[in-house]
Amino acid sequence: MTQPSPETSRPSVSFGQILQRVFNPDLASTLGSIVLAMIVGAGLIALRGVNPLLAYQALFDGAFGNLNSIAESLIVATPLALAGIGVTIAFRAGVFNVGAEGQLYIGAIASTYVGLKFANLPGYLLIPLMMLTAMLAGGLWAGIAGLLKVWMGASEMINTIMLNYIATFLVSYLVHGPLQEPGSPLGQTAMLPAQAWLVHILPRTRLHAGLIIAVIVSIIAAVVLWRTTWGFHIRVVGKNPIAAQAAGIKVNWILLSALMASGALAGLAGFGEAAGPQHRMIEYISPGYGYTAIVVALLGQLNPLGVLAAAILFGGLEVGATTMESAVGVPSAVVTVIQYLIVLFLIGRGAFDLIRQKLHREKKLEQRT
Amino acid sequence: MEFTEKKPSFDDQPILQVKDIVVTYGSFVANDHINLDIHPGEIHALLGENGAGKTTLMKVLVGLLQPKSGKIFLENQEVTINSAITAQSVGIGMVHQHFMLIPTLTVAQNVCIGLRSAGYPFPDLRKVSNRIRELSERYNLQVDPNVKVSQLSVGAQQRVEIIKVLYRGARILILDEPTAVLTPQETDGLFEVIQNLAQQNNSIIFISHKLNEVMTISHRITVLRQGKVVATRNTPETDVRELARLMVGHDLGNLNVRHNVAKTTTPPLVRIENLRFVDERKLESLRRIDLDIHEGEIHGIAGVDGNGQEELARILAGLFTPTAGKVWLAGQDITHASPARRISAGMAYIPGDRQRTGLVLDMSVIENSILELNTHNPYSKNGFMNFNEINNLATNLVQSYDIRCRDLQQNVGTLSGGNQQKLVLARQLFRNPRFIIAMQPTRGLDVGATEYVHSMLIEQQKMGSAILLISTELDEVLELSDRISVIYGGQIMGTFHHGQTKKETIGLLMAGKTL
């Protein structure tokens, strides 16, 4: 029997959705992938004539060896976690948000602007105001890609990537132009008033309250995804938009709102960078946190608490890499290789599962007929 | 329809003997010591529910599967059939349920695909055509070798498949559910062809789960259940009742449909006016549909698959927007209402493809049971899900609709087809909907589950729901419906009250003939 499969007005199924199916690792395969990536990394290090164990020891010392290195690792982990949870929420709805980087920049510049504009407000008003602004700005920025997707079926992947360029160049213009610190040749805004700074939470380190925000956000995100109707809708749409639509779920609204929430969290990450370590907006405020966040989200198994853990791991790797480079002369790029190898192994593992599932299905089909 | 013809003798040597065939998939035994013999000129029906092992056995015969143990004898010689090519060389051919034809090529081109003997690298199409004409004449197949397959009707395409098999020298033809895609008239035509083939000493293995057909066409019937042969009967010595019992393993309850034909005097609950739908490919899949459905009525839509049924169902469910026309539910214009609004207004949709549209396979039974109602009180409050209530609901559904699952957390994708459909049904029916769109509600289900689904729909009808039953199983429509409309080419060809018209008339309309 031929099965008619009318394509009309079906919600678009994106690449992200396919990836999400590939990417459904359990804890064992996650840890296994990390170990495998470390082994390959060890090979690379050995090729440079360095004892990999020594290098890894330097890496670990640099990441978590003392209070200060722990603090530094957590500082990097904070934006990774926030943006990573953002990516997670979109991912759960089957939307692939590659634009966390741009949303982070937009959130950072918007909250800095508000922080400077309302510099006479007390901290307990100014900081929430800045946070809200950052989330709103990041959310709206992501919403551009969301609307294009919902209205015209345009791929959110392409559009969020393109919006990244627009965002970073827009910020460059602003910090060199209208928002540039008066009298400074650098691409940066004036310093935020002191009451807008995120307080330090660990004595004698730069660790700031952004980490607390990240922890709270990860808990809230987990509750939202698994305890609220909106979160339920997000997960249903991510797994089967057609069934979702037939069951009366507003698929387009879910796609749009999940992407906007995703952007809002990336924007919040931007606020954390501006109000935390930098105390102002600078031209290159993020060394690609928004992109690394995608990897972190996947490594965290698209579970907000897992994402937090993955962010801490990646934060440690980034910070430790510098130590390793200066201590034993292994280029820090090796760590980047390791980071992405983890993901490749995970995807490989997931693809393996998918193939197995497919074989299993075929077998079951044979059994049935 | 009765055929009188020479009966094959079951005393002479069988042409094909299957001995103790065992096929396993992991721990699942699909074929459990199957024995079967087929005589020359015999039409042997293989009867069984879905999953009884019919297709598995046939796959062994055509070399697509290797049995774990057991032997196959062809004219008393043991043969090992390890590929489709060997099957072909020993004279076994299969006509698949889904045709294996390339629509843009001619019949002759389709027939000689993959055959070096037709000429290599360039097949001698004239020779092929002549041979096709010969075969066509001999068995009265009425196939023109030079016509493109896309221009042929479904019935003719099936005859092309038969020619393909005969061309390759088959003496034993396996037909897998050949009537599933045919109108009643086409089915009669096919049966004549099968008779012709058998009378010229070809053997036919006819796979089916339709009892009436098997009774009409076959000489002998072998019934499979759960991978085992439960009985082989000479057709004249058995009846539908016995076969049904053998197939299912127990007696089937009698479906007594109470028909409330008179109800159509009250204003209809659902009115569909002038519905037209042009899809993205600019195909006009619905030309003009006018229908009304009353409370307490099952309104059946009969038709061959692909004549606009899917589009009609989706428009009514709110998944497609019609190009023109209106849909009214209880006096309200719902033509442009969202699925959510329709659900609130008491509409329920049982989609034809439950795995894609009906369920989220990758989620649990409990999550699937609240796909529609999760935003409603008491299942959620202020946006937060109330898992106590949801749990109760799911437990309730599983119990009252007899959904077999390990626990509520089990992934729906791992449930059997029948249980998946029960879950879809449970979700839709427990709300006591006023209007039910049931699209192919028993597709792929075994006899027991089909019976259950039918009884649920009838119960719902008795409670006053208006039910639109869209099905390509004509018997199902005839059995359940108070009124029957026939759809062809996106148009309603006619509407009849139950028992007001003959099956043949409906068959003609299904084939696009006007009365």
Image (cartoon, coloured by chain):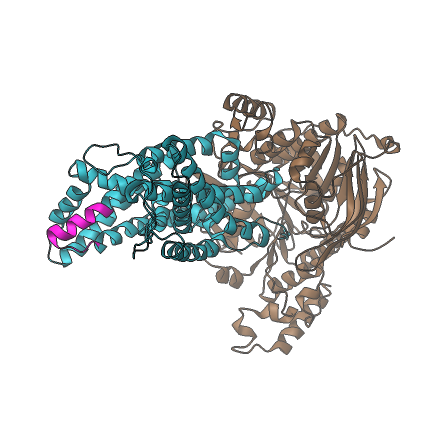
Chain colours: A cyan, B brown
Q: Quadrant of residue B511?
A: bottom right
Q: Main secondary structure of the magenta part?
A: helix
Residue for point 61% across, 30% down: B427
Residue B271 placement (x, y as % from top left):
80, 40
Residue for point 55% across, 47% down: B55
Q: Quadrant of residue B477?
A: top right
Residue B436 placement (x, y as % from top left):
71, 35
Residue for point 60% across, 34% down: B424
Q: Does any portion of residue A31 appear in the rendered image?
A: no
Between A80 and B423, the residue placed more toward the observer is A80
Looking at the rendered structure, the number of numbered marks drawn on it comes to: 0
User: Is A164 on the left or on the right of A345, as rendered?
Assistant: right
- Indicate whether residue A260 is drawn in magenta: no
Residue A264 placement (x, y as % from top left):
44, 42
Q: Does any portion of residue B71 appear in the rendered image?
A: yes
- Indicate whether residue A321 is drawn in magenta: yes
Between A95 and B58, the residue placed more toward the observer is A95
Between A36 and B181, the residue placed more toward the observer is A36
Residue B97 vertical placement versus B130 (above, below): above
From which residue to which does the magenta span run? A318-332
Residue B417 placement (x, y as % from top left):
56, 38
User: Is B501 on the left or on the right of A126, as rendered?
Assistant: right
Between B191 and A51, the residue placed more toward the observer is A51
Q: In which quarter of the image is residue B425?
A: top right
